[in-house]
Amino acid sequence: MSFASLGLSAAILKAVEKQGYDTPSAIQEQAIPAVLEGKDVMAAAQTGTGKTAGFTLPLLELLSKGQRAKRGQVRALVLTPTRELAAQVAESVSTYGANLPLKSAVVFGGVSINPQITTLRNGVDILVATPGRLLDLCQQKALSFSQLEVLILDEADRMLDMGFIRDIKKVLAMLPKQRQNLMFSATFSDEIRELAKGLVNNPVEISVTPRNATANTVEQSVYAVDKSRKARILTKLIKENNWHQVLVFSRTKHGANRLAKNLDADGINAVAIHGNKSQGARTKALADFKAGKAQVMVATDIAARGIDIDQLPFVVNFDLPNVPEDYVHRIGRTGRAGATGLAVSLVSDEEVKLLHDIERLIKRTVERKVIEGYEACHDLPEASLKGGHRAANHKKPNPNRRKHANQADGQKQGQSTKQGQRPAPKGNSDKPSQRQRARARAEAENAQSDGNKKPQNRRQGRTDKSSSQGKVDPYANARR
Ligand code: AMP
């Protein structure tokens, strides 16, 4: 299958070719013809599947055939949950539409509203926006939707997660009834289906990834590590394997800052990106990272949402996410569109339950690895993928192993990390709602320190030490 056979015009095909894409991805193959036929689409596709081009290319094709936007009008509206995603979608619109006479704009909060008002006054064919700033602009009568032809909700599940449902409904109430609707979401939860009922008409349903699956192109591994040695182990992994363009996830903003400083002190150029940073600082950090000036970017989940970097080769979970679905989203930043990626998680004693929740969600056991000389006091028993933890005895620290580890740590060796035992966590029968999960995520990110410790897991058991540090070349299967 080629892009030309999908019914796109020469101007768009030329832009696609310039990007080096020769074969449409699965979502593109299905979404492009449906959108071109004017149908509503509901697509389950994660970041990394090529979904942005999946809706941008046919959108450009449709709009290039109609009347240009009149003053103050918008012909297509793309709503995204975050500023970063908005900026990236807008970049794709510019890239793929480079040979077309269409005007596009992007608006989001955290930057001055006046230039945005000026741009909108002239009319734009495609507007990419985050919901809050869009509503502010509507209140200021900066734009009108009476010429609107297409509405696109990108990462709809994230929008609900982040509490944008009321804003979305307000926007929907302002749009003309007669329009084409496209909705993209990583998953089709009940809440998403509920939202879709009032949004899409007789949609073509497309699903390119099974629910909560992780891409096969991502090599995943976990290391059991003592919490106090995580930073040192991360430095070691990065230096010894010569990793570049490493996206590291931290659970807290404070932790992200601290880790970036630590890496810098170890001679690894690192930037941090999180909600407490100004929009300018976030944009600069992302630009430095993309340009390779920063070897590592440390991010919190909310800040990293939707970040798209071509062929991002390495993702490290310095802290495991509290919400298992976030693991899927985090590692979805690597191994995209045919490239191979590596996702590494550092798992401390108190994160074992989180690892098991993740493994049950993705329905697979992640490969356990060990770094010689840096073995932890705890093991990572395999989770029963059917639910419930495998009962096992807590492993006693091996004094020889600790001695060995101390030697490897040299002068910087900190205190031993065996923490006092805490009550085992509640069973997972009372599954938290999406909103509760979103709140947990926001609270975790807002925590000023890592003091919000999870209850420690008491169940320990067998470890599968399958290999030592695996070195992979993430570009080995690089994109066509
Ligand atoms: P997305 O899922 O939209 O975030 O896209 C993921 C990445 O895949 C982006 O970096 C795109 O540039 C890239 N991409 C999109 N379509 C293709 C394609 N057909 N072939 C190769 N790469 C693609």
Image: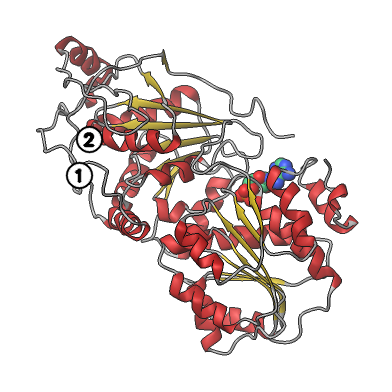
In this picture, residue 447 sits left or right of residue 27: left
Please identify the quadrant where the N terminus is shown. Answer: top right
First-in-chain label (1 vs 2): 2
Q: Residue furthest right?
A: 10
Q: What amino acid type should be assigned to the residue bearing mark 1?
A: Lys
How would you rate the neighbour count of disc 2 (Cα within 10 Å): few for under 14, some for 14-19, many for 20 or more? many
**In this view of the protein, which residue sits in the foreground, 216 or 43?**
43
Q: Which mark is residue 453?
A: 1
Q: What amino acid type should be assigned to the residue bearing mark 2?
A: Glu
**In this view of the protein, which residue sits in the foreground, 379 or 87?**
379
Which quadrant of the view contains residue 410? top left
Q: CA distance from mark 1 to mark 2?
A: 8 Å
Helix, strand or loop at label 2? It is helix
Q: Looking at the image, is 232 positioned above or below residue 140?
A: above
Residue 166 visible to an observer of this rendering: yes
* Point 55% across, 22% down: residue: 472
The residue indicated by pointer 2 is: 350
Q: Which mark is residue 294?
A: none
* Point 75% across, 72% down: residue: 103
Which quadrant of the view contains residue 26? top right
Which quadrant of the view contains residue 460? top left
